[in-house]
Image (cartoon, rainbow, N blue to C red):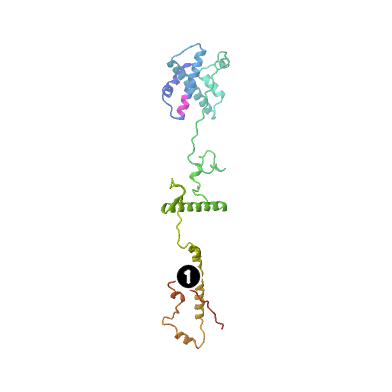
Amino acid sequence: MADPAVASGGPLNSGGRGSGTKAASSPAENYHLARRRTLQVVVSALLTESGFESAEKAAVETLTEMMQSYITEIGRCAKAYCEHTARSIPTLPDAVVTLIEMGFNVDTLPVYAKRSQRMVITAPPVTNAPGTAKALSAGQKRTHPPHIPSHFPEFPDPHTYIKTPTFREPVSEYQVVREKAATQRRDVERALTRFMAKTGETQSLFKDDITAFPLIAARPSAIPYLSALLPSELELQTLEETDSSEQDDQTDSENTVGNIITDDPGADKENSMLPPSGVVPSAKANEDNMIDNPYLRPVKKPKVRRKK
C-alpha cells in the first residue's frame, strides 16, 4: 500500500521540504506551511499511538512527506473519477473507488476510526487576514445590473468615475453670516489697535512693565470743540452728492428750456448778447476755490422763479 504513496511522493519531496525551510512571504506559502505543520502533528500523534516515545526529525519529515503524497494522490484520483462522470465536485463514492483502486481495504476504516487509543487533535486556530484599508472611498459601490452576468468583473471604485466636488458650498444662514462678520470686524479693530500702539505713542497702566496692556496716548488739542463742530467724512460725502445732484437737475432744466424753438421776436436779441463761445458760464466754473468745510462756505441766495 505504501509503494504508490512513495512513488507519488517523489516529485513532492523537494517542494514540501523547501516550504518548511524557506521563509513564507505570500498567502499561498503561508497556507502550505500551515498545512505542513498540521501533517507533522498528525504524524507525531500516530507515532505516539504506535508506542514511540521519540523520533528523529528526518524520520518525521519522511513520514510527513509520505502522508502528504498519499493524500494528494487520493484527491487527484477522486477528481479524475468525478470529471469522468461529468461532475465538478467529488463525492464519497469517488473517494471509495480511489481507495479501492490504490489497494486499500475500505472495510477496515470504521474499525480504525472507533479505536480506543485514538488521540484527538485540536483544530489549528484560524486567523483572519488583516484587510487592507482603501486609500480613497467616495460614494457607494455599484452592483451589476440585471442584464450583466455575475461572473463579469465588478465595477471599479466609485472615486474613479464619479464626480467628487472639492469645494464647500457658501454658508447662507443669517446667524452664521452675522457671527462671521462680527468676528472679522473685531479682528480688524484689534489689528488696527495693535498697529497704532506699535507705531505711535502709547501709555501703560503699569510703570514697571511698559509693554503690558499698552494704551494709545491721547493727543491734546488746542481747540477741543472743533471736532464736534466739523462734520464727519460721511456727512461731507453726503452733502457733496446732494449738491451735485441739484446742479445736474438745474443744468438739465436749463438745457431743456434752451432747446425749445419759439417765434419770439426777442430771441435774436438774446442770442446776440451771448458770448462768442455760445456757452453761458455756470456758477460752478466760477467757484474753483470752493472751501471744503460747509460751515465756512459763502451764503447762496435762493433762486426766485418769475411767474409767466
Q: Looking at the rendering, which quadrant does residue 14 occupy? A: top left
Q: In this rendering, is residue 137 above or below 67?
A: below
- The percent position of residue 3, horizontal first and vertical second, equals 46, 17
Task: Please state which of residues 194 and 280 is positioned toward the viewer in this rendering.
Answer: 194
Q: Secondary structure at mark 1?
A: helix
Which residue matches tag 1?
296
Whether residue 101 is visible to the viewer of this picture, yes or no, is yes
For the C terminus, which image quadrant? bottom right
Q: Residue furthest bottom?
A: 265
Task: Please state which of residues 104 and 22 is positioned toward the viewer in this rendering.
Answer: 22
- The percent position of residue 162, horizontal first and vertical second, equals 50, 46
User: Residue visible at 47% across and 68% down?
Assistant: 293
Q: Looking at the rendering, which quadrant does residue 87 occupy? A: top right
Q: In this rendering, is residue 301 above or below 38?
A: below
Q: How many residues crowd mark 1 within 10 Å: few (<14), some (14–19), many (20+)?
A: few
- The percent position of residue 180, horizontal first and vertical second, equals 52, 51
Whether residue 70 is visible to the viewer of this picture, yes or no, is no
Q: Which residues are magenta?
A: 28-33
Q: In this rendering, is residue 35 above or below 205?
A: above
* Residue 29 covered by magenta stretch: yes
User: Residue visible at 50% across and 78% down?
Assistant: 254
- The percent position of residue 83, horizontal first and vertical second, equals 52, 28
Task: Please state which of residues 292 and 28 is positioned toward the viewer in this rendering.
Answer: 292
Question: How many discs appear?
Answer: 1
Q: Looking at the rendering, which quadrant does residue 88 occupy? A: top right
Q: In this rendering, is residue 134 above or below 169?
A: above
What type is the residue that disc 1 sits on?
Answer: Leu
Report the magenta stretch's main SS.
helix
* Residue 166 covered by magenta stretch: no
Task: Please state which of residues 17 and 24 is positioned toward the viewer in this rendering.
Answer: 24
